Amino acid sequence: MGMVTFVDETTAGSRGDGWGLEIAEERLALRELIRRRVFQEVAEYHAKRPEVFQGLVQPEGAERTLNGYALRTPRRIDPEKQTELALRAFERNGFLVLVGDRQVNELDEEMDLPLGVEVTFLKLVALVGG
């Protein structure tokens, strides 16, 4: 079992602190890695009940804020729906995924997850006027 560190970055230059998740497998498809990340984010949100959801993608019915996504009405987030939103965002080039220094291009592509690997989710920011 090894620790995978997830880090969020944007093309505008911001970089999150990162957080770890225990992954038992040494190889995993990107689709499954995204699913596990999203399920962990949702579980932490439900356990802590913060005012803002800090996750990979915006939940339905939420508004983007400086530090995440604010739900207009506090409610439970469905991790399956949130995973589908994340997978669709990846397919629409909403973010890139780098495992170590290698970009993963396909959801069903399996990747090696060596001990302590950093997985970067590079969120693509639309250009003004673009």
Image: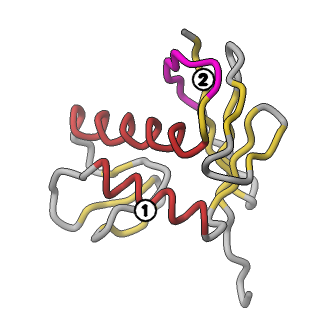
The magenta stretch is 18-27
Which numbered disc covers residue 4?
A: 2
The percent position of residue 83, horizontal first and vertical second, equals 40, 52
Q: Are marks 1 and 2 in contact (CB under 8 Å)?
A: no
Quarter of the picture containing the C terminus is bottom right
**Chosen colour scheme:** secondary structure
Q: Which residue is mark 1?
A: 85
The percent position of residue 94, horizontal first and vertical second, equals 62, 65
Q: Amino acid at mark 2?
A: Val
Which numbered disc covers residue 54?
A: none
Callout 1: SS? helix
The percent position of residue 6, horizontal first and vertical second, equals 59, 33
User: Above or below — where is 13 with respect to 50?
Assistant: below
- Crowding around mark 1 (Cα neighbors within 10 Å: few <14, some 14 to 19, many 20+) is some
Give whichever of 31, 128 is nearer the camera. Answer: 31
User: Above or below — where is 60 with respect to 24?
Assistant: below
| Res 126 → quadrant | bottom right
Task: Kindly report the distance in space between the C-alpha atoms of the residues bearing marks 1 and 2.
Answer: 22 Å
Is 64 positioned to the left or the right of 30 in the image? left
Q: How many marks?
A: 2
